[in-house]
Image (cartoon, rainbow, N blue to C red):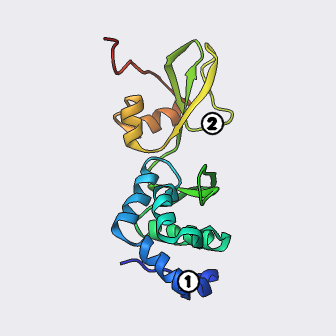
Amino acid sequence: MFAYSPGKFASLYASALGQRIWAFLTLPESVARLETASELSKPAVEGIEEQLLAEFREDVLADRVKQMVGHMVRQILGQRDWVLDQSDVKVQSVPFSKAARYRRPDWITFHAFRNTSDPRDVVITDRRQNAPLPADARWTYYATFASPLKAAVAFGVRDIRQLRQHVLSHGYQRLRIERMLRRA
């Protein structure tokens, strides 16, 4: 199902450990975990770290092995139409300290800022640095998202293409996020 081109990891991949890791990573449940983490805008390996440690214990702690795992994950997700979103994302876990995050090619990364005096007043832009925010309020960074699902659930955005067009033409989109749950 998946093809791996080991490149600089050829000797490690040819070892019994390399073969076992590839077999583990290409299991349907491992691929599903990689994709789920990616859909949540998390580094892909966050979805498999526990299972990887359970299966390979301290064998997976070597830097070269972790690098090969990342190399393998990139090729697996690439064959499933994911693209690199950001490399060297900090991960607070064992065995990884940094990892790559992936996204779908049609996803657009947006950044949300909250009004400091009204947290329900939100501005969405396509830039985190030097974003063109409205001058009538003070804004603090709130979140980054690319998934259309996150846009819909967290910000009420039903049409991601329309949001993109508005941001491209006006620099930002201002939204009012209503409370989802009411006090009892």
Characterize the local packing of mark 1: few (<14), some (14-19) or many (20 or more) Cα atoms within 10 angstroms. many
* Residue 40, image x, y percentages: 44, 47
Please tell me which residue lies in front, 144 or 91. 91
Disc number for residue 13: 1
For the question of whether residue 5 can be seen, the reply is: no
In this rendering, the answer to whether 167 lies above or below 33 is: above
Please tell me which residue lies in front, 61 or 81. 61
* Residue 5, image x, y percentages: 53, 81
Residue lying farthest to the left in this orientation: 184
Please tell me which residue lies in front, 39 or 65. 65
Q: Given the image, on which type of amino acid does mark 1 rest?
A: Tyr
> Which quadrant is home to the N terminus?
bottom left
Whether residues under marks 1 and 2 lie with C-beta atoms below 8 angstroms apart, the answer is no
Q: Of helix, strand and loop, which one carries label 2?
A: loop
Q: Residue at x 55, y 88 (%)?
A: 14
In this rendering, the answer to whether 69 lies above or below 101 is: below
Count of marks overlaid on the render: 2
For the question of whether residue 53 can be seen, the reply is: yes
In this rendering, the answer to whether 60 lies above or below 157 is: below
How far, Cα to Cα, is label 1 from label 2?
Answer: 39 Å
Q: Which residue is drawn at 60% across and 83% down?
A: 12
Please tell me which residue lies in front, 73 or 110. 73
* Residue 151, image x, y percentages: 41, 36
Q: Given the image, on which type of amino acid does mark 2 rest?
A: Arg
In this rendering, the answer to whether 28 lies above or below 17 is: above
Residue under pointer 2: 128
Q: Residue at x 39, y 65 (%)?
A: 31
